[in-house]
Image (spheres, rainbow, N blue to C red):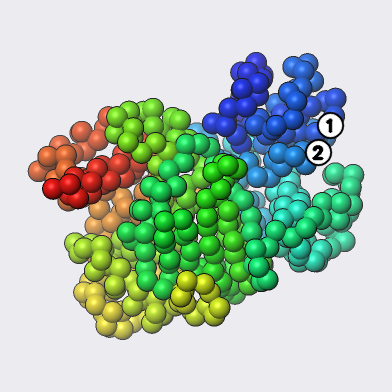
Amino acid sequence: MQLDPDTCYETLLARDRRFDGWFFVGVSSTGIYCRPVCAVRTPKRRNCHFFPSTAAAEKAGFRPCLRCRPELAPGHGLLDLSSGLAQAAAALIEEGFLNEGSVEQLAQRVGVTGRHLRRIFHLEFGVSMIDFAQTQRLLMAKRLLTDTSLPAAAVALSAGFGSVRRFNDLFQKRYGLNPMRFRQDSSCAEAGTLTFPLAYRPPFSWQGVLEFLGFRQIDKVEYVDESIYARTVEIVRRDGKHVAGWISIAHAPQRYAIEVTLSSSLTPVIAEVLARVRRVFDLGSRPDLIDLHLGELAAGLPGMRVPGGFTGFEIAVRAIVGQQISVPNARTVLSRIATRFGLSVEGAPFGLLPTFPSAPALASVSPDLLRETGITRIRAEAIVALANEVASGRIALEPMAPLEDTLAALRGIRGIGEWTVQYIAMRALAWPNALPEGDAVLMRHLGFSQTAALKQHASRWEPWRAYATLHVWRLAEQAKLHR
């Protein structure tokens, strides 16, 4: 990513939050690097050096600012194909992929050769993937030391270090400080929980996202009220182990962040949990670009996001179950599926209990058992077939998956139509230009009877058709309420 120093400095002077996380500034007079929204006195232009990533700043010898904390900056959305592959690889690295996997395996995951990925990654971030991964481990460790009271050994392992000794040596070498220097009072809201802030770029329609999620919440798996989103979660690790717990998210508008509280049972997978929460709330979005492009359509709800799923497989099952039935009926079926096939999470708040079943769990279920939850045979067979594809790794339902290959694989499963494919692309693959073709609400509200006419009309919204879809759904619901 090419950075224009003069433009970056003007942004730094303005402390423009729209560009938080898009670049970092290293100050040669202090040896510190900051976010462009840091509240410290603005350094002189001649002392400023601009970097596309935290890893690039640290490779140049700068240490992270203790005030603005660069590890808290918002991430990037998948804005275009040229940078999408590099961003996809970065997202996987942030989740800890290279803690257990290789660069070649990472390249295979995003659908390119290792050589090509190394080249485009360096162009995008200014460092190698290994350097980037090392910086992410250090910043996660710094975050855990600052925001929790976890023992040093737990911090080292949760951040992806193989040993406490390796963690201490690298921390001292990179930052010139003992790791315990960052230890502060625990931010735990109560015993057995951990709390972390995740930043966003304003505006952010917290109420709009809550209403979207609340209308679709699965009883006992999710809880939504006017200020909180909570749910049970299950993560299948690469070693096959299942880790379950619960999370609760609240809004902290004064900090331009959401606050994520999670059960201590999720400590081994903190990085992955936080990455998935970012997907659910679409925190990498650029509302300044999207709302400007959509114009009047977005004016009534600026900063609306396209909510993702905690797992892409869950979104896919939601889409399959929801084909041609009402949302309330789909919620009832999904709750039955979770109660029967999910794991139980004891001690969760708000009456939460089962997790939504993982792909490996449903891959071993017969379609006849799934039919007992209230769905047709063809949908039950589609869910089991998809579960087998996801569990085997042949299909990856996540933002970093190769788009066209994934969509083609989904179309090849009997019982998955184009509306379902596009809905999965919109919420599981985070594809901003997805359009659920033939959607009854879109067709009726916009006055079209043919899918071709809808697609032609929607071309004005490209490349943000998924965001436009949510706004049309919202307007249709408002019109319905005012009849």
Q: Earlier in the sequence, mark 2 or mark 1?
A: 1
Q: Observer-nearest residue: 443 or 135?
A: 443
Whether residues under marks 2 and 1 lie with C-beta atoms below 8 angstroms apart, the answer is yes
Residue 31: numbered disc: 1
The quadrant holding residue 54 is: top right
Residue 397: numbered disc: none
Circle 2: is it few (<14), some (14-19), or many (20+) Cα within 10 Å?
many
Q: Which residue is drawn at 54% across and 44% down?
A: 253
The x and y percentages for residue 396 are 46, 58
Left or right, 195 with respect to 55, comes to left
Residue type for callout 2: Arg
Left or right, 216 with respect to 44, comes to left
Give the SS element for disc 1. loop
Residue 63: numbered disc: 2
Give the SS element for disc 2. strand
**Could you tell me how far apart the alpha carbons at marks 2 and 1 are, in whole angstroms?**
6 Å
Q: Which residue is drawn at 38% across and 47% down?
A: 208
Residue type for callout 1: Gly
The quadrant holding residue 411 is: bottom left
Q: Which residue is drawn at 26% across and 32% down?
A: 459
